[in-house]
Image (cartoon, rainbow, N blue to C red):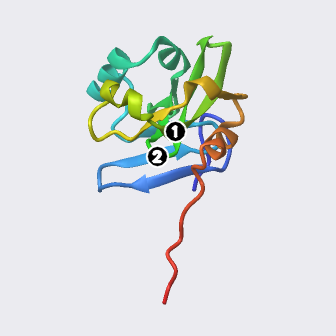
Amino acid sequence: MSTCPHCGGNACYEQVISEEVTTSFCFGCGYSTSTLMTDKSELVVKTLETSPELYKDLMFIDSNSLVWFPSTVTLPEKGMVFLDGNSKKNWKWAAVNSIEILEEEKAKFPKDQTTKMDMKNIKHFEKEDFMEALDAINFFDVEVAESE
């Protein structure tokens, strides 16, 4: 864990992927980056091409020229956390749980898909409540295997 350059919190998880690549994900503010996400890099340019305007508006460049974006967390069997809003000043975190696809709906989905996001029961969380949004989809519920 390290200090997040975006929010200043101490809940930023860093993971070394390889000698060249480290990822950072802040559980405090919900922003993430990697050592490949430098200002004007090909990866950032491609990310900007495919990101919604709100994500582009909220991106942050730290003192090391790393570009941080708000995260979207999708766990197909649990739910999803994402930005919901229409401007840099008017947004919140949104959380939806996954629900079983009803038999009569199955034709609308890929054959192997068994759940969908329950957008009818969306929950909103303030900007500083990213962890609470994750908790709403049971992100932190980890099953621990029993030892014999």
CA–CA distance in space, label 1 to label 2:
6 Å
Write the residue at 68% across / 44% down.
Answer: 9
Residue at the outermost bottom position = 148
Residue 98's label in the rendered image is 1
> Tags 1 and 2 in contact by the CB under 8 Å rule?
yes
Q: Quadrant of residue 133?
A: top right
Q: Is residue 116 left or right of residue 49?
A: right
* Element at label 1: strand
Residue at the outermost front position = 104
* Picture coordinates of residue 123, whole percent (x, y): 68, 29
Write the residue at 60% across / 54% down.
Answer: 140
Q: Quadrant of residue 34?
A: top left
Q: So how many labels did they put on this image? A: 2
Residue 77's label in the rendered image is 2
Q: Amino acid at mark 2?
A: Glu
Foreground of the two, 53 or 37: 53
Q: Quadrant of residue 49?
A: top left
Write the residue at 62% across / 48% down.
Answer: 3
Residue 47 vertical placement versus 2 (above, below):
above
Q: Earlier in the sequence, mark 1 or mark 2?
A: 2
The N terminus lies in quadrant? bottom right
* Picture coordinates of residue 84, whole percent (x, y): 59, 20
* Picture coordinates of residue 138, whole percent (x, y): 60, 49
* Picture coordinates of residue 4, whole percent (x, y): 60, 42
* Element at label 2: loop
Q: Amino acid at mark 1?
A: Ser
